[in-house]
Structure formats: C-alpha cells, structure tokens
C-alpha cells in the first residue's frame, strides 16, 4: 500500500544478474509476485474466507486463479463482501498485469 492505496505491481519487480553455480556463466533472474492474499486485518492468512489471487501456468501460458481454498462451498463458488471487493478487484488486475509481462518476456526470449 502506498498512501492507503494499493500499489499496482509491474513485471518484473526487479531483475538480478548473478553467476550460475553449475554453468559458471551469468544468468538473469526475475522476482515474480506469484500470489496475493486478501483477508480481514484481524484474521490469519489461513482464514477460511481469505481470497487468494495467484498466477498459474499449465504450459499454455500464465493465467490468474481466484480461490478460497479453506471455505467449504458446495458449488466451488467464492464469497466476496462488498467492502473487500475493491481490494480483490485491484489485486486481480495486478496479477493480470504480471501475467502480461510474463507472456511478453517469453515472446522476447527472456530479456
């Protein structure tokens, strides 16, 4: 958060170049934010209604998954209260922005 506003994520957050321990040559590494957890301030991260927004990739390109794995929903639905929607919406958009960066990075050969 920056001044009470959600700071939008951009890809990559940072790039590190270091020596590869097997190959001996320099390699670049990206730090990729893979998930965001939205939950009430006074609840733990394993709270059953915590909403997890994560980046997934099943070899067909990255996509965003929204889940509440601790909640037992009959129809695999998630529950969202009106007060938490703006943060969930913004977090989903952040993760989508990261996936677009991942796709562009793949198309450009990792540079």
Image (tube, rainbow, N blue to C red):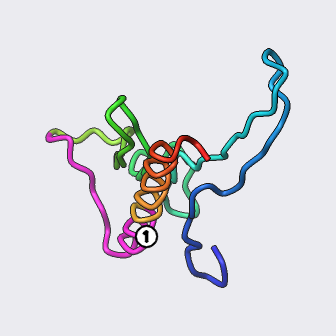
Direction top: furthest residue: 22
Image coords of residue 105 (percent x, y): 52, 48
* Residue occupying image coordinates x 45% and y 61%: 97
- Left/right placement of residue 5 relative to residue 18 reads left
Residue 69 figure quarter: top left
* Residue occupying image coordinates x 41% and y 52%: 51
* Residue picked out by circle 1: 90
Per the image, is 78 magenta?
yes
Q: Which residues are magenta?
A: 75-91
Q: How many dots with numbers?
A: 1
- Left/right placement of residue 80 relative to residue 19 reads left
In this picture, is 40 found above or below 65?
A: below
Q: Nearer the viewer, residue 109 or 94?
A: 109
Image coords of residue 100 (percent x, y): 42, 56
Image coords of residue 104 (percent x, y): 46, 52
In this picture, is 41 found above or below 57?
A: below
């Amino acid at each position: 958060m920056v001044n009470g506003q959600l700071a939008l994520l951009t890809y990559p957050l940072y790039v590190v170049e270091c020596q590869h321990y097997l190959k001996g040559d320099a390699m670049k590494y990206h730090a990729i934010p893979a998930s965001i957890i939205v939950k009430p301030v006074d609840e733990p991260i394993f709270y059953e209604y915590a909403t997890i927004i994560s980046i997934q990739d099943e070899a067909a390109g990255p996509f965003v998954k929204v889940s509440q794995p601790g909640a037992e929903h009959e129809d695999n639905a998630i529950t969202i209260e009106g007060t938490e929607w703006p943060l969930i919406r913004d977090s989903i958009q952040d993760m989508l922005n990261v996936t677009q960066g991942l796709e562009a990075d793949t198309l450009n050969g990792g540079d």
